[in-house]
Image (cartoon, coloured by chain):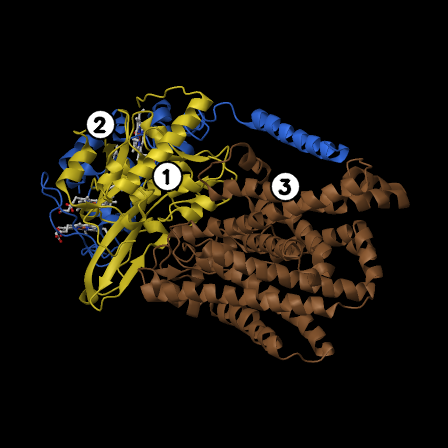
Chain colours: A blue, B brown, C yellow
Amino acid sequence: MPQHIKRLVSAFAVVIILFLVMQQVLTPASFGKLGHYRADAIPENEMKTLHYAGSAVCTNCHEEMQTDKALGFHAQLQCEACHGPGLKHALYADKFKDKELPDSLKLHKPDQRKDCALCHEINAARIKIVFDTINNTMIHQVNTLKHNPVNKRTNEKVICIDCHNPHQP
Amino acid sequence: MTQHLQHLYEVLSKVDGYVYPNEIELNWSILIVLYPYITGLVAGAFILASLERIFKLHVLRPTYGIALLTALSFMLVATMPLVSHLGKPFRAYEIMVTPHLSSAMAIFGFVYLWYLMVVLLLEIWFDYRCDMIIWAGETTGVKRFLYRAFSLWTTDISPKAVALDNKLGYIVTIIGVPSAFLLHGYVGFIFGSIKANPWWSTVLMPVIFLFSAIVSGIALVMLVYNVITRIRKVKIDMPCLDAIASYLFYILLIDFVLEGLDQIHRIYEAEESFDVLHNLVFGRLFFTMFIMQGLIGTVAPLLTLGTLQFYKPKEKIRKVIYMVIPALILVGIFFMRWNVVIGGQLFSKSFYGYTDFKIGLIGTEGYLMAAFWLIVPFAILSFLLWLFPPWKKKDEEHEVQNA
Amino acid sequence: MTQTRSKVTRRNFFKAGSIIVGGIAVASALTPFDGVLFATERPKGKGEWYGIGIDINKCIGCGKCANACKLENNVPKDPFYFRSWVEQYTIKNDGTILVESPNGGIDGFKQSVPDADIFKSFFVPKMCNHCAKSPCVQVCPVGATFETPEGIVLVDENYCIGCRYCVQACPYGCRFINPEKGTAEKCTLCIHRLEKGKNPACFEMCPTEARIYGDLNDPDSKINYFLKNHTCMVIKPNLNTGSKLFYNALSPEVR
């Protein structure tokens, strides 16, 4: 082989070897264990923090609400659907029994008309048919702006929960 | 961050119909328009060079070296727009380390390397090695060092070695032509293989990209050659330009026919996505598609170059034409890429609406960044022309004396 | 979650990989294509293989799922980033179709067409389809998005390069680039909740049990019950993505 071709080939060989070495060094350890990805990514995804506690948890401390709710039309509703994510609250609220809860542990109280309207506002797409044959319920709809906006006796503005108990409507 | 969001809210107010909420933001912006544009210029310039070498079209000789160096300088920045638009640019190496073989983009890394290392660099090396050794003897300082280093400190300029260089260079060119086809066909495949997007997903996409690439590359070399001769104050080789112009005409014609075929096929089949695409083309894409790409970039050059095929005006007029037409074609092909990349994201994959597109001047996705990546190749090209002037090559001077 | 994660050496993996890829290619060429059953059948293995069912008839469009998803997964609040959202389809008497999703449905829907003009109207909750043949997994250049052995499509945010190719490839618009992280993001079926034995947030918060999920490999699972007792359909079956999100009462207008 002529000298310059030798040089060229060795230059290429050096580049290729360098590349292969880099490839070995840079490939993450768990790559390829389960497929063409980092197997460690699964536990990493599983380690994310939770925010919602799930319904069963609330019962531990708020039994009366749970029993109230179970009897009413909102039986299927999760507490957190209205009150927002409450895992932190469920973990730490105990320490503040009979005391004012710190803001970070307070939960949202959806008492405005628009909060109930999310589910109950009249809309052509909301089914009016029986959808749960077991409980035989349907989603009842009202025009939240016109349905009892004021107290007829005092003529004051009222919100939904003045008349309906949100936990047992 | 907040600026980005502000911008998105502005776009939100311009949304027409319904788009999926995640589609309001355009994911591939002007940098991804540049990426196929620049790779296309590389492939086209190289193919022009190989016409001379493989098919022995010696009229094209004056542009051979320029075409190769142009291809190299654009090749060196071809991936930069892609890398600089990444959300995590410093992880770009992962494409080479753990390439996912079913991904068109991952394989592009290797196609790119193959083309850069095995085709372009080798061909140029074989072409210039002998000259670099001679030049190294004539110069001093950094230039001398660069020549030495680039020739890998070889010294053999015996006729036998030079003949071997020529032979190997020829082989590399032969490998190079399909590689250039592969390179740019592959870029087309990156878009053509997205089945979710009816504007991109067509089998013709790689072929269309390829032919438009050849068109744009030839136009660029023509322009660069014009400019260089003017700067060097030497005589323009008119037969060469005439020949290039006629190749340009035929390839532009093929490109036009292919794109027409694609659209006709779309219109005739009129699939589910037809309405949304129809409104897109006559609405948000009208200007870039019909005016910039169609009229300025295709029809005007086709008519002018077509006329030249049977009627040759005076040399002075032809010189002007050979300056203006390549420029128009380059603009047209840029907007062809624009229409593919941006157009493909302006409509919703739900086929129920359109989002809007707006880019700023600054920022990683702005006009300035794009202009930067378009200027850098020319800077590299000037450097390469300074270091490796094709007109100072030994065989070139020889030819001039012979002529 | 119980699963069998066997340790395969790299070479074996490539061998197996090429056999599987080739096998799938051959199999998909030979077996007649069925949009629904296609993804329910797992090629091999006995572990969990998740599928999702959504009953459009039950959805009341409260947007609690979309809201819960954002809160549970720290998704940016702006209306351009959703892992899960709700659309309202309104088909008018004159045949035109109106689709709306103001802020993904989180703030509720307002009926924008008078009753008299409406032919029919319904809500469609959208989320990642966790496709068995995900186009997004196919195009990821570095293997930063993948399907777990349980059939959940995940993103490896510590490996994603943010090239946005997957966003382009998803036919359902279920992916976005997180503006702070610069990496792709999508529904994980709340794998962090599943792992602790809890339901994913959107399933948990649904007031009408319009959405369910379960193990497609288990013949007695909720999802199999759902599939057997309803006329189910996936969105865009023509794209052959192997979607594992099955809708009951899906209208063909939904795309």
Q: Residue at x 29, y 50 (%)?
A: C238
In this figure, which residue is indicated by the disc labeled 3? B118
Q: Give the camera-side residue of C186 and B227.
A: B227
Q: Secondary structure at mark 3?
A: helix
Q: Position of residue A49 (x, y in %)?
A: 41, 29
Q: Chain of mark 3?
A: B
Left or right of A94 in this view: B364: right
Residue B265 — which label? none
User: CB atoms at circles 3 and 1 under 8 Å apart?
Assistant: no
Q: Is residue B362 above or below residue B128?
A: below
Query: What residue type is disc 1 on?
Result: Cys
**Spatial CA span between label 2 and label 1:** 33 Å
Query: What residue type is disc 3 on?
Result: Val
**Spatial CA span between label 3 and label 1:** 43 Å
Left or right of A119 in this view: A28: right
Query: What residue type is disc 2 on?
Result: Glu
Q: Give the camera-side residue of A124 and A86.
A: A124
Q: Secondary structure at mark 1?
A: loop
Residue C187 — which label? 1
Q: Chain of mark 2?
A: A
Density class for disc 2 (Cα within 10 Å; few <14, some 14-19, many ≥20) is few
Q: Position of residue C252 (x, y in %)?
A: 23, 55
Q: Residue at x 76, y 62 (%)?
A: B228
Q: Position of residue C144 (x, y in %)?
A: 46, 35
Q: Do the residues at discs 3 and 1 belong to one chain?
A: no
Q: Nearer the viewer, mark 3 or mark 1?
A: 3
Q: Is residue A6 above or below residue B307?
A: above
Q: Secondary structure at mark 2?
A: helix
In this figure, which residue is indicated by the disc labeled 2? A63
